[in-house]
Image (cartoon, helix red, strand yellow):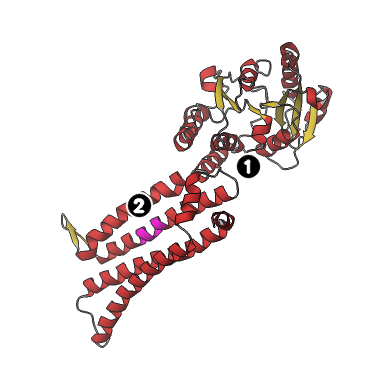
Amino acid sequence: MENSQIELTILMPCLNEAETLATCIRKAKKWLLESGVPGEVLVSDNGSSDGSREIALKEGARLIEARTKGYGSALISGIASARGWYIIMGDADDSYDFSKLDAFYASLQEGAGLVMGNRFTGGVQKHAMPFLHRHLGNPVLSFIGRLFFKIPIGDFHCGLRGFNTEQIRSLNLHTTGMEFASEMIVKAKFFKLRITEVPTILYPDGRSRPPHLKTWRDGWRHLVFLLIYSPRWLFLYPGLFMLLLFSVLFILLQFHEVNIRGIYFDIHTLIIFAFGIIASFQMILFAIFSKVFSTHYGLIPEKENYRIWYKYFNLERGIALGLILTLVGFGIILSTFLYWRHINFGEVKNISETSREVILGGVLSTLGIQIIFSSFIFRIIGIQTQKNLS
């Protein structure tokens, strides 16, 4: 069949699926034939050693090899090789029914960029999903995805999904592991693809061996991906909360000790709050670094406030602000040193007061130095953006 005649590619990532691959291919080809959709079945093999490749060719599927290991790698290779205008992907373990793809295809024809299956609305058959996946892993990670990215999807990890080939390629997907499933959804949202959801039935898979998915390892990788792609929740919001909290506590102890029901909080506690201010400010800087880096290298789309940030918070202003804080901090420390020299470097009687001054000076000067060097890093990362604004 000529490439121009292929409307739909049914993509199956495969790693040692000899027990179920033939069944999946036959169901997919049956659906293509009965629906009259010009299409192909594409198997993206990820290093099978059980005869899966031979089965794919025997059943009339087109076979490619994804040389880099990983679920995401197999799908990235398959998406790059697909000939259809649309792609419907699904696991080759017979847990999804490839003979029932009408809802996916209809949504794609109606203009959806990404069509997600939802196993919780479609139905999870007995023994089809482990207890932890069904009641903890999937619900929690899907909730985090909805919270962080405002994506109205009930099942972030359904393995059966469809998408517009050209649009999905434009997302520059690159994760090679199971977290690929989350990357596709998050980037589809970032780049404003139209996302829809259809009920999908999950069946017990037909394999006699354990699944490739590792509950805790792959769950952790999904969570890390969601956090990395949402620096607001990983760094910014916790950093702002901690900065406000530690700053208030620092100010309370800056002038005198605090007695709460006979428990005294003094210099040692003030030092801890000082470290807290510095650490929380560093978290906020990390959030900004992540945003700038991700935008500059095309991992997330550029928004208007990104250019506004560079317009008003440039290198020169950052250096100026940092120098002011640094000089004020050093000035406070210097005044304390001069007092100590005035008493011939002897014993300081008002140690509590002078210690508070030194700690305040240290905090201000440290924050100032952080701002100065962070400004240079922003300039390095976003030098092209700043050139365009000049």
| Mark 2 or 1, nearer chain start | 1
Q: Quadrant of residue 254?
A: bottom left
Left or right, residue 33 beside residue 291: right
Mark 2: amino acid:
Met
Q: Position of residue 104 (x, y in %)?
A: 62, 20
Whether residue 349 appears in this view of the structure is yes
In-front residue for pair 173/126? 173
Asked if 33 appears above or below 13 in the picture, the reply is above
Where is mark 1, residue-wise?
A: 175
Q: Position of residue 226 (x, y in %)?
A: 51, 40
Asked if 290 appears above or below 161 in the picture, the reply is below
Q: Position of residue 322 (x, y in %)?
A: 41, 66
Question: In this picture, which residue range is highlighted in magenta?
Answer: 275-281
- Tell whether position 37 is magenta: no
In-front residue for pair 31/367? 367
Q: In what quadrant of the picture does the C terminus appear?
A: bottom right
Q: Quadrant of residue 23?
A: top right
Compute the Cα span from label 2 to label 1. Answer: 32 Å
Residue 388: mark: none
- Tell whether position 279 is magenta: yes
Residue furthest out toward the front: 390
Left or right, residue 236 beside residue 224: left
Mark 1: amino acid:
Thr
Where is mark 2, residue-wise?
A: 242
Left or right, residue 172 beside residue 275: right
Residue furthest out toward the bottom: 344
Q: Quadrant of residue 13?
A: top right
Q: Residue at x 67, y 22 (%)?
A: 94
Asked if 295 appears above or below 129 in the picture, the reply is below
Whether residue 123 appears in this view of the structure is no
